[in-house]
Amino acid sequence: MSITQHEGLLHSYEQVGAGIVEEGFREYSVPVEIRFDEIPDLVGDRLIAKIETIGEELARQTSKDGFKKIEEELSKVGNFVNAAGRPVSEEVFFEMLHKMDMSFDDNGNPDITFIVHPDMGEHLRRLSEEWKSDAKFNERYKELMRVKREAWLDRENNRKLVD
C-alpha cells in the first residue's frame, strides 16, 4: 500500500457537480497558560487533566468545523435539511429520507446513515420507537423504501463499469 503525501498549503480535487475544489489547511489553536505557582505541582494527574482540557477544546473545534463542512457539502448537493426551529417530527424525518440517495443490502434493507448530535441521536431513537407502532407511519415508510429501492436498482443497472 502506498500513500501520496502532497506538499504545499493548498490541495485540490475534482468533485462531481462542483468541478475542481481547492482547499487549504484549517488551523486550530488553544491558548495554554501555565502560572509559575502551578509548575511544582503540574505532574501526574494534574498534568494529564491540563492536557486533556487542551485536547477536549481542540476536539470541540475540529468537530464544529467538521459538521460545518458536512453542512456545506450537503447543501451543495441539496441533501441538507434545515428544520428551521421545527421540532423533530415524522414530516422532518420523511423530508430527510426523500432527499437521500440510498443503497440497499442483499436482503433489500436500506443502508441509511444520519449524522446528528449524540443528544439528537438519542431523541431520534426514542421517536422512531414511537413511530414504529404507528400503522400509517409504517405504510408511508414502506412505500418510500419501495420507491428508493427502485431508484437504487435503476442506478445500479445503469452504472458504467468500464470505460
Image (cartoon, rainbow, N blue to C red):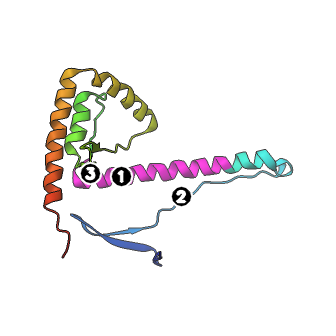
Under mark 3, the amino acid is Ser
Q: Is residue 25 above or below residue 74?
A: below
Magenta region's main secondary structure? helix
Mark nearest the camera among 1 and 2 is 1
Please provide the residue range marked out in magenta.
Answer: 52-79
Under mark 2, the amino acid is Tyr
Find out whether the residues at labels 1 and 2 contact each other: C-beta distance under 8 Å: no
Tell me residue 121's x, y (percent).
41, 35
Tell me residue 31's x, y (percent).
63, 54
Which residue lies under the disc numbered 3?
Answer: 75
Horizontal side, residue 96 vs residue 159: left or right: right
Q: Using the image as rendered, state which of residue 48 and residue 130 is in the foreground.
A: 130
- Give the Cα separation between the discs numbered 1 and 2: 18 Å
Residue at screen point 21% across, 27% down: 138
Q: Quadrant of residue 149?
A: top left
Under mark 1, the amino acid is Ile
Tell me residue 154's x, y (percent).
13, 54
